[in-house]
Image (spheres, rainbow, N blue to C red):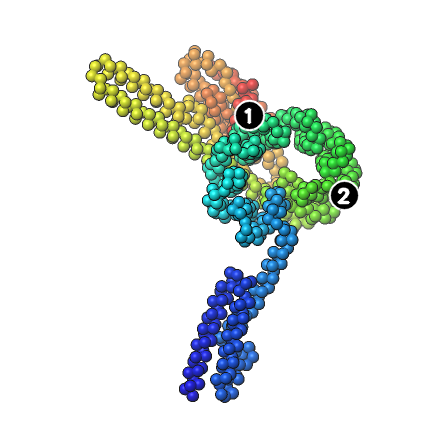
Amino acid sequence: MKFWQNNRYREKQRLAVTLTCFFVSVFCSTASFASNYSSSVANNDSNSLANSTEASSNKPDASSNKTEASPNKTSPTNNDWFSKRKKNAEDVVKVAQIDKVKNRFQSEFKTLSEFLSAVQTPNAVTPKKQLAGVEYFITDNTLTLAQLVNLRLIKAHALYLSGKPAQSEQVLNLVISDIDKLAEPEKLVLTLRLHELKIDNAVSMLDYQETISHFDNATALLDEWADKADNIDYLWVFWSLKKVSFFASLQDHELANRSLNTAIEKANSSGLMPLIVWAKQAHIKLLIKQNDLFLAEQSFKRLVSYLQDNKLSSSSLQTQIEWAQLNSQSLKYREADKRLESVYKSAQQVRNRYLQLQSLIALIKNQIAQQKLEYAEQLIKAADKVKGLTNALGRDKTEQLKTQNELYFVKAQIALLKDLPDVSLKYLSKIELEFSAFNNYSSETGVGKLEALKAQRTAEVLMKDWPQVSKTTGLIEYLENRKKEGMQVQLQAYRDFKVGRQLKEQQNMLDEHQAMNVNLSNALVLLTEKLSNTRWLILLLVFGLVLFIYNAVLRRQASGRKPLAHLSLAVAERAIEQLMAQMNNVQISTNNLPKRSQAEVSKLKMFTIIAMDFNGVSELNASLGIKAADDAISDKLERIKNLNKQYQILPINGHRYWLVANNYDLNQAQVLVTRIERELESTTPKLSARYELCDVNEPTEFRTILNQLESNLAK
């Protein structure tokens, strides 16, 4: 009996050791379960089989048979082992699924070079698929260091597109040390790509100090490689235009124009026609963003002439389509229609089906804007015929998706104009939003999410589906407010960055002047110790006094305390920004809309600035004195302000002032100017002024308003 109990005890010990080994093997198999599964199961099966045979041989009575019953009646230890067997079976299913995904991915991208070329095409590979591709190819042990770095940069870019800039930044920080080990040609390309990705991450995180730092590093790198790289002209133009896009998005048109001039200079010096055309196209886009449509049209005219002179027919036709779209934006529909019809005929002669279809789509949009439905329907039939031809939709997936979406969208708009909301919703449901259009709420190329939602809401209104109309309206307002708030946050962060940088520069100048003062003082002390003659001492003191006065003037200039200019502009900018914020916060409930007219609603969201430039101020200073003249002007301004206590008078520069009239339109401002002139002439000394008006009904950069008013007053 004791022998049997001892043997039973040894059996339990063996079983415990076996289960422990099994749990360890299961834990390790989670890292590489595909390779370790078969060995772990085989070991467990052999161990359990040995235990069961040993138990049956050591038990003389029938009680041992009860312990080897069905799995439902086993001991707790055997139950746990059985559950682990079930989990391993599930792991086999997961392995099969992963293998299936890998096989599908390998069939789509057979080699690493195919994957890299596909990723370089915009919107050709989704971020999720890019991450999967990186994980698939990075396990290859034959990869070079350059290929490994390239894959990690692709991973960082995919994380950025997925809205994870912090994780993308972590991946980029791990790549820096590997890039330093590369050879020179590959090192330049991948370092510039690293700076480009870091700029994208910094902009998304509103870290403009880091953004400017990487722009400067990239520029310094291009200067260093000026005589080494073959494509240095292309790189200069690319990075200059990237700066243009960055500054233009933040409404810093001064720096945007400066970067554009650099791009044009580098393109012209290279003599390469593609770079010259690229820079000219960027110039036109910047003019359109600055709302300078007249200069944009003149630039279009010069660019088309340049392309035709160099026999670039396809580029010329594409540019004419963009020119016609600008004509439509300026409500010059006849001119746009003539240009688009000419483009269609020219594209038909050279058999460029893509440009044929693009000109037809632009023509259809013009007819919809002019409410010419019959002509639009004829053009739709022609477009349906053309799109079936080779390469009519585009050469890559991105162009094809964009063209197809635009066709569906214009068909949906025509259906809405014909009071066919169900047909319109059918076409809208076929639109496939690309990743950038979906995330950016609107798209410059193709149909954006907001455009599709607004058309959907119009169709739902025609169908009188009011619950769905309410949901769609809420989504549209959410997206619009989110976009507007995001833009305001970006502009405010950039303003804070510029102010901080200016203060830092001024502090550096003051520190330099202070150090110069200390050095001069030490030099004077040494000279006075060596010179005992009183005459020389007096001369040195006079010289030191002159230096002190000169330094004081420099410090005053460095601190930015110019007479009335810097402080006045800062006060005016804060006042205008407060009005902008109030204008954005105006919310009118739908219950109050029937009680107010549209004019009253629009007044709550606008204000008018009257810029006044007083004449004859220098003569007034000469006759009365500066203090008396300033008092007289202050008295005039006080009288003007008393016309309405809500007026704000902001000093701008010298004898120029702004009067801000809230909830005033241009007609009311003209009447107010007449009253101001009467006040100026009614009291002595009589003054006259030149006036310039500017109505503001949407968020606008302060510097834009200032430049517009100052340039008009200077004429």
- Front-most of residues 190 and 699: 190
In the rendered image, the residue lying farthest to the left is 532
Spot occupied by residue 102 in the image (x, y as percentages of width and height): 61, 56
Q: Residue at x 54, y 28 (%)?
A: 262
Res 625 visible: yes
- Front-most of residues 492 and 340: 340
Residue indicated by mark 1: 708
Bin the neighbour count of mark 1 within 10 Å (Cα to Cα): few under 14, some 14-19, many 20 and up: few
Place residue 72 in its image quadrant.
Answer: bottom right
Which corner quadrant holds the C terminus? top right
Q: Residue at x 50, y 86 (%)?
A: 63
Horizontally, residue 9 falls left or right of residue 165, namely: left
Bin the neighbour count of mark 2 within 10 Å (Cα to Cα): few under 14, some 14-19, many 20 and up: few
Image height of 472 relative to 319, above or below: below
2 or 1: tag closer to the N-terminus: 2
- Front-most of residues 435 and 70: 70
Horizontally, residue 545 falls left or right of residue 443, namely: left
Which amino acid type is shown beneath numbered disc 1? Gln
In the rendered image, the residue lying farthest to the top is 623
Identify the mark at residue 388; answer none if there is no mark. Answer: 2
Spot occupied by residue 229 in the image (x, y as percentages of width and height): 54, 34
Res 476 visible: no
Element type at marker 1? Answer: helix
Which amino acid type is shown beneath numbered disc 2? Gly
Which corner quadrant holds the N terminus? bottom left
- Front-most of residues 297 and 8: 8
Q: Residue at x 68, y 46 (%)?
A: 431
Identify the mark at residue 389; answer none if there is no mark. Answer: none
